[in-house]
Image (cartoon, rainbow, N blue to C red):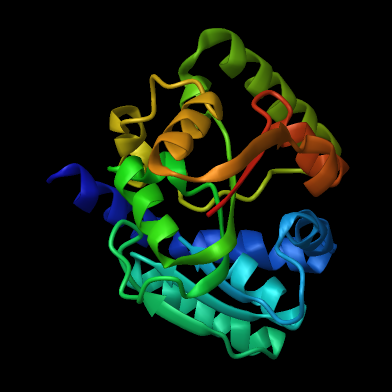
Amino acid sequence: MELTERVKAGWRISAAGYSKIIQQEFQDGVNKFWEEAILGKAPHGGVLKILDVGTGPGFFTILLSQAGHTATGIDASAEMIREAKENARTAGVNPELLVMDSHKLDFADDMFDLIVNRNVVWTLTDPVKAYQEWRRVLKPGGRLIVFDGNWSSNTDAQVKARSDADREEYIKKYGQPLISYKPDEEEKARGWKRDMPLNDEKRPDWDKKILSSIGYRDIDSKFILDEVFDEKRKLLNRANPMFMLWASK
């Protein structure tokens, strides 16, 4: 099975479990942290037309719809989109949710004020092509906001040791954390991780270089552990903190 199909199969396995994770984020109120982080860097001026690439079970699409913006969520996994539609219905919003390849968008040029995604770029088989395509559909002056991390560094012994220790501490304090797949499904769900093209790249430095070469401007980034996680989620994420990257067209 080629890499693209392995990735899709992994998200198919993870759809229901990932949906429970984002439902918990809404229940715990951390959606407000994410909303503030996104809109603090978004273009200003009324209702924004927003594209959430790799929406999964719809977290960003739903919270941005609740904030009064016109959000469209896409994902390559039909199972994820099914979960997103159900979550949106429960949340009382009705955004557009579509099955679509993140590398090849079925949208006209210059359509969106803002493109967002979380934990998506590291899963892409051709991230350069995706960044080019996302720029195409951004309006002039529109902004891209990416949340991601060096997730492949979990294979580094020191990072893994810190992560395992933090997980043990989490379990003692809060119980077992939610995961999106069953333990015996790990190879099918995430085995493709070792073959992703960004595994050997230092990020977000790599992203900044690529975005600049493509023609994005006003590129910057920061690590955001303290901005978007509550205390228990900080514990699970501090060994390999997430970054926020933004750029304009």
Image quadrant of residue 89?
bottom right
**Residue 214: % across, % down:** 39, 42
Q: Is 173 placed above or below 13 here? A: above
Q: Is residue 184 left or right of residue 85?
A: left
Front residue (pair 88, 113)? 113
Residue 56 is situated, as x and y percent measured from the top left of the image, at 49, 64
- Please state if 145 lies on the left or on the right of 7 as rendered: right
Left or right of 239 on screen, residue 226: right
Give left or right: position of 61 versus 138. Answer: right
Viewer-proximal residue among 171 and 25: 25
Q: Extreme top residue here? A: 158
Residue 181 visible in the picture: yes
* Residue 74 in the image, given as x and y percentages of width and height: 43, 70
User: Relative to 205, does residue 27 appear above or below in the rendering?
Assistant: below
Percent across and percent down for residue 138 are: 49, 64
Name the one closer to the observer, 53 or 76: 53
For residue 188, which quarter of the picture? Answer: top left
Residue at x 85%, y 37% (from the top left corner): 173
User: In this figure, what is the number of numbered marks?
Assistant: 0
Along the line of sight, the residue nearer the viewer: 24 or 47 = 47
- Does residue 162 lie above or below 51 as drawn? above
Q: Is residue 186 visible?
A: no
Q: What's the residue at 60%, 15% (across, down)?
A: 159
- State which quadrant residue 215 falls in: top left
Which residue sits at x=47%, y=49%? Answer: 120
